[in-house]
Image (spheres, rainbow, N blue to C red):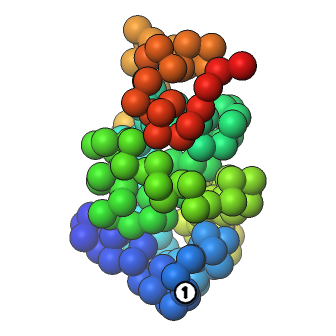
Amino acid sequence: MLETEFWHLIAESRAALREAHVDIQEQSEVLKSKLISLGPQPIIEFKVVFENKFVNANSWELCAVQFLAFGIFTDTSFNAFRAWLIAQGEEVYVRGVKEPSTLADLLKEEDSLSLLDSAEYFLYCADLAYEELIGRDIWDDVPEDLPKDTMESDQTFDETNICQVYPHLCKLFGYTPS
């Protein structure tokens, strides 16, 4: 699957809901149905592109944005946040990965707890579609050469010094450490 097809499916899943504020859980259901209709190979191809986008969105600055927007940082919350970022579509994703501060206004409009809970559905959308269609785990059939989801080891996320490392983000989110 080409990236253009991947982003087209994401855009279709958003447009199908015809709402100004798209519920990501509903978007996930729309996308899952569309993937099932395409068959097993396109689902695997979608998953490969998704995983590449997911890994590409793994940065310390995006960690900081996620923490500042939601007040928590865990592996699970960051994974859900990156799934949410992909679900927003190509334009928001590309802009957000390149310059994470551009996500501030968009995130201020979101209900943080429901967003992180709902975004987890999007994270596993292709997995669920494949399992429903084929009856087995998608990871049994996904190529093994996917990029690893790891961070650069020269830095760690530390909320105690977040405003020293990312003062512009703290200002955007109105965050002052306690």
**Frontmost residue, 80 versus 33:** 80
Task: Kindly identify which residue carries mark 1.
Answer: 19
Amino acid type assigned to the residue bearing label 1 in the image: Glu
Closer to us: 39 or 151: 151
Q: Is residue 32 left or right of residue 120?
A: left
Name the residue furthest top.
154
Residue 123 vs residue 158, the one in the foreground: 158
Can see residue 153?
A: yes
Q: Percent position (x, y) of residue 165?
A: 44, 17
Residue at the image position 57 percent from the left and 55 percent from the top: 108
* Label 1 residue SS: loop
162 lies above or below 86:
above
Give left or right: position of 73 versus 102: right
Left or right: where 11 falls relative to 174: left
Give how far across and how far down residue 118 sits, in percent: 69, 62
Horizontal side of 86 relative to 125 (left or right) equals left
As drawn, 11 above or below 122: below
| 4 or 41: nearer the viewer | 4
